[in-house]
Image: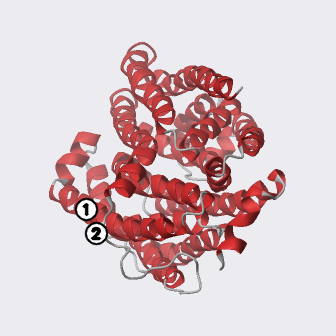
Amino acid sequence: MTIENATTNLGTENIGKLLAQYAIPAIIAMTASSLYNITDSIFIGHGVGPLALGGLAITFPLMNLAAAFGTLIGVGASTLLSIRIGQKDYETANIILGNVFVLNLIMGISFSVVTLLFLEPVLLFFGARHEMLGYAKEFMTIILLGNVVTHMYFGLNALIRSSGNPKRAMMATIYTVLINLVLNPLFIFGFKWGIRGSACATIISQIIVLAWQIHLFNDKNYFIHLKKGIYRLRKNIVVDSLSIGMAAFLMNAASCLIVILINQKLLRYGGDLAVGAYGIVNRIAFLFVMVVIGLNQGMQPIVGYNYGAKLYPRVTAVLKKTILFATVIMVIGFTIVELFPHQVASIFTTDEHLIEMAVPGLRWVFALYPLVGFQMASSAFFQSVGKPNKAIILSVVRQVFLLIPFLLIFPNYWEVTGVWASITVADFFSVILTVVLLAIEFKKKE
């Protein structure tokens, strides 16, 4: 792909058409990925049992922490790449690719080694007990052994999208999902590997697709590609990438602490099945969040390029359309869950008690979803224009200064309901803060 074909239209094409061109493949990819997570939970729920769902939910904090280190590199570097392309600095764009490759190797291996050494104590701290500990340990051991593959896969996919090829990024995710959907039931039901089969399916599918991604970046005709001289870590690129990606890192890292608190409170006031209920709520909530993330990923290269090229009216237009579409997506999720919570929960299990515990959680968590899309799009906007501080403020305030105190206080009075209500109330105040920060940003541009 030539430089002109990949990037020129970002500064000239109709905004709506561009957003559709970049966002639809990303949305399809994120939706496919989220649907895989849902079907993964369905296979585990029906093929292994309700307690296995609880064991899976116990691993969410560790999965969030692993994702935090991955996004620290991937989100920051892909944003930096879009800005450099907008500035027509193609030499630096190639060096960013090499630095991402090396950083993911270092980060992925280091995280796996440290975590595997202390896996059982970590899971116990997260709230695992009895049978749930065994399920969680089996699953995470395999996931962590393949963690460097996961980091590399997501990091390279972010660069594929930001370098002007959203369809290839979409296909990478879809290939992973399709391979997963074949291997998951084969390993769980056919080979009787239980929850380990699900973890094996995840890593094997990522290995196959990573090989394809590396093949793409070895193409000398692609305007950024793997070659000699780009692998030495450059201080300015590493620092800029990590600073831009810090908001996404803190959001995922804080999510780790949040999930630990949620699991502990649910175990205390509702028992093991309450944790399983959270596993169901989390998967459904994540489906719509992932769709908006896909939309934001489509927005990112367009905003980054135009901001780098100082085409500010186009930057504003992209943000407005992204907020509109994000709101529509979340309204759809809100409507489905509020009207049919029992039917949604029953997809995962036939255990009526577990379903009844999941229903109020679904209703509470989705209560403010019509406003959450706006908050997510605005946070992604600040990252896309290389202003991580405001994105960090949004993520840290919601997770640390709002949700954690609510989780520490509300369940003492309303038990399990207090856990669900904490999430909704935190969303409300974070939306207000987003309005304030966005208003300040655009007032500066006037």
Crowding at mark 1 (Cα within 10 Å: few <14, some 14-19, many 20+): some
Residue situated in front as seen by the camera: 356 or 391: 391
Residue situated in front as seen by the camera: 19 or 238: 238
Q: Quadrant of the C terminus?
A: top right
Q: Which mark is residue 112?
A: 1
Query: At 45% from the left edge and 40% from the top edge, which residue is drawn?
Result: 247
CA–CA distance in space, label 1 to label 2:
6 Å
As drawn, 55 above or below 405: below
Residue situated in front as seen by the camera: 372 or 198: 372
Q: Can residue 194 be seen in the rendering of this structure? A: no
The x and y percentages for residue 265 are: 36, 29
SS under mark 2: helix
- Determine the residue located farthest toward the left in the rendered image: 117
SS under mark 1: helix
Position of 10 with respect to 93 (left or right) is right
Residue bearing mark 2: 145
As drawn, 77 above or below 284: below
Q: Are marks 1 and 2 in contact (CB under 8 Å)?
A: yes
Dot 1 amino acid type: Ser
